[in-house]
Amino acid sequence: MSWSRTLLWFIFWFALAASVQYRWDTAVGWIILTLACGVILTIRRRQANRVAVWAAHPETDPPADVGQWEDMVASLYRHTRGQAIAVRTLQETNDAVMSAAQALPIGAITLNKDFQIRWFNAAAEKILHLKPAQDIGQNLLNLLRSPPFVAYAKQTTWEEPLILKIALEGKTQSIMMRLVPYAEDQLLLIARDLTQIEKLETTRRDFVANVSHEMRTPLTVLSGFLETLREAPKGALSEEQSQHYLKLMHEQALRMEALVSDLLTLSALETSLSADRNLVQMSELVESARQQAESLSGARHIFHWEIEPNLNLLGNQTELSSAITNLLTNAVRYTPDGQSITVQWRLQPDGSARYSVTDTGIGIASEHIPRLSERFYTVDRGRSRAMGGTGLGLAITKHVAMRHDAQLDIQSKLGAGSTFSLVFAPDRVITAC
Ligand code: ADP
């Protein structure tokens, strides 16, 4: 468009200059034409310069007043804008995909055909203890140094995952790995840490075995006595013997009842993570626990009570009652006659509240202490059973503590007694005037 305008302009002035020359026989027209051409060329050169400067950064706004370059500049600008938008969209898509891959809860590692690491996400970093700064570009087979993984990697297809036991940073981990080929000669390695799942599975199996074992013993005793009573010829058992058998059967039935009751309590505690926040009058709860403990003790122990009357909690009354009674009855069970038990319920300087039961009983060797709150863990199973224990009391107490944002603290020395404490966070503590 502008080129044709320039051409028309030139033809017009050329014709005018030729007419002037012809009519008046003077070169004035040609001089004017030459001058005008000079001016136009200068203007065009400046416009071309502006275009050249802009063309180095065509994504910026195009320059104004570029004469005949205008059409070209406009279409180049439109094209560059279109490209920039396409690149930005691609970049955003790429960023979103990479963020999603980073956030995957399973480990993902991309490898080339020689098993050199090209990229890995945060979960892979954690599971396989990889370090981005030094492991990118390394050969995964050399890093893992696991013959089963090398054998797996050398397969040509990977239909099944491999479960690998490897020692990483001193810990044996169970990791499920699966290779998936993609694109051309690229491999994606998926890694899942199964250590925790396997541990839970073992705990579950142990739990079922323990429950069955604990139930079988009283059931065997019960059915044994029932058989004896049923099959004994009339008059073969004295009244005294019969009463004795019935007493033993009753004890076993009570034991099963206690077990089932503790199991139900545990399963109820597991249904939610946090306990209610009802106002619980702790002095009333301790009073009720006191009656049970003193009745169980039958005046065989010396009790000391140091209870702050106006110190209360936000929590679940039934659960708290079960926890504080458990600690107290344990102290009675595991403290020989004539010795003392001290119960304290106190506000701490940091605003927390501590319920503690200190006995001068048999105490516990240090290696058992970390395991005491495991289900069915007992230091001496025979003694626990003889005392009417189920092995679930501290597991219940620990659960109640967790649900009330409290810590179960155990201090004990073999032969010298123990202190079991529940420390409740200030957020759960209410001090009434
Ligand atoms: P149990 O029903 O057997 O008492 P717990 O879970 O309440 O089960 O306690 C687990 C084990 O911790 C008990 O078997 C006992 O060995 C030990 N234990 C608990 N409290 C005391 C204590 N006050 N003194 C000594 N040992 C204790």
Image (cartoon, rainbow, N blue to C red):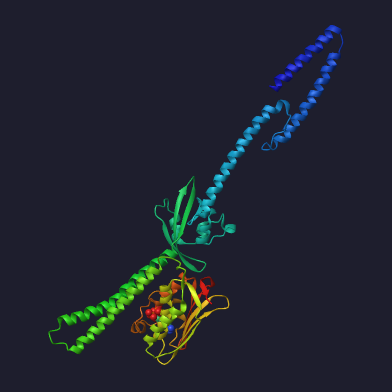
| Residue 302 location, quadrant | bottom left
Q: Quadrant of the C terminus?
A: bottom right
What residue is at 49 percent from the left and 75 percent from the top? 312
Q: Vertical placement of 370 versus 110: above or below?
A: below
Q: Nearer the viewer, residue 63 or 180?
A: 63
Q: Vertical placement of 135 versus 89: above or below?
A: below
**How far across and how far down the image is residue 151, in percent?**
43, 57
Q: Vertical placement of 169 versus 4: above or below?
A: below
**How far across and how far down the image is residue 260, in percent?**
32, 73
Whether residue 413 can be seen here: no
What residue is at 12 percent from the left and 85 percent from the top? 234
What residue is at 54 percent from the left and 48 percent from the top? 96
Q: Nearer the viewer, residue 137 or 359?
A: 359
In the displayed structure, does residue 169 sit left or right of residue 317? right
**How far across and how far down the image is residue 135, in percent?**
56, 58
Whether residue 282 can be seen here: yes
In this view, which residue lies farthest toward the top?
Answer: 23
**How far across and how far down the image is residue 104, in percent?**
49, 54
Q: Nearer the viewer, residue 200 or 376?
A: 376
